[in-house]
Amino acid sequence: MLDKLTTEKRNEKTMDLDLMSVKEILETMNKEDLTVPQSVASEIPQIEEAVQKAISSFRKGGRLIYLGAGTSGRLGVLDAVECVPTFGSPPEMVQGFIAGGMKAFTKAVEGAEDNEALGVEDLDNISVNENDTLIGIAASGRTPYVIGALKHAKAKGATTVSLSCNKNSEISKYADIAIEVETGPEVLTGSTRLKAGTAQKLVLNMISTASMIGIGKVYKNLMVDVQPTNKKLVERSKRIIMQATETDYETASAFYEKANEDVKAAIVMILLGSSYEEAREKLEQSNGFIRKTK
């Protein structure tokens, strides 16, 4: 099976990788990496479908769930946890699962990725349902853990999406939407943390960001639902208020405090000359979209 996967083939440009100078290795890797965005671009129609399904899930109170093994699982977990500080989303809204559990994030768990039942178990633990969108991630496109999860999610009525780096991959058979970013042979044969991992990261960035924009968590190009959990983010919050309303730092800081550190409410307060209570009410009426408040 492996010899049929492009991600497992040897790269003709790197047959003498061990004889290259450090500079030659870096230049070769850089040239290979440049091909990844082009491969992602060819899958934008499928990525768009996945985003629309994720937005639909969020609007129904459902979740976006990432699931994978090894590097694929780690990338899903990474994207999920970053949604909380970036978009102010509750932790359960975007979730990431890795074969073998969170201990597998730093240390491989033997046999976990080869077990379909573990994928089913992880989804059962969160009661996956028809309101959810599941994205099964596997560079090879054949990971049993992911296949088990996709089958189970589909049986429960959830939207299923596969993300692989080989065409006609096995996991695509069990998905409503198949994203197949063919990244080709790796610089280091079979090391799919390289181009394949980069492609997966790019796609996950696109899906989570576009989905959050689709439910009103962005105003212009500003992350207006950012959670000010440290000094840097407090200052970023004030800067966002300044940029969104074209006001000065002092005004932004004052409204940041008046709005109980709620960036989005502070922006509406300034733009519409409203109180904090009125701003929150207007945001409720507009489903969180600042542009739709009036």
Image: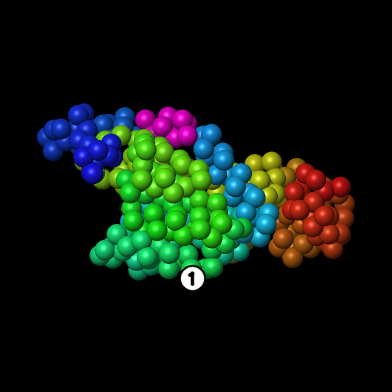
Label 1 crowd bin: few (<14), some (14–19), many (20+), radius 10 Å: few
Residue at left offset 80%, top offset 45%: 292
Q: Nearer the viewer, residue 3 or 218?
A: 3
What colour scheme has been applied to the protein in the rendered image?
Answer: rainbow
Residue at left offset 44%, top offset 56%: 151
For residue 36: magenta?
yes
In the image, residue 43 above or below residue 121: above
Can residue 284 be seen in this snapshot? Answer: yes
For residue 195: magenta?
no
Horizontally, residue 104 falls left or right of residue 10, namely right
Image coordinates of residue 67 in percent, x first then y, are 43, 57
Quadrant location of residue 198? top left
Residue at left offset 64%, top offset 55%: 58
Give the SS element for disc 1.
loop
Horizontally, residue 276 falls left or right of residue 228, namely right
* SS majority, magenta: helix
Residue of label 1:
125
In the image, residue 176 above or below residue 183: below
Image coordinates of residue 184 in percent, x first then y, are 30, 34
In the image, residue 105 above or below residue 46: below
Can residue 231 be seen in this snapshot? Answer: no
Report the span colored magenta. 34-43
Residue, far bottom: 125
Number of numbered markers: 1
Image coordinates of residue 236 in percent, x first then y, are 62, 53
Image coordinates of residue 104 in percent, x first then y, are 33, 65
Residue at left offset 53%, top offset 34%: 45
In the image, residue 227 above or below residue 169: below
Amino acid identity at mark 1: Asn
Placement of the N terminus among the 4 image quadrants: top left
Horizontally, residue 194 falls left or right of residue 65, namely left
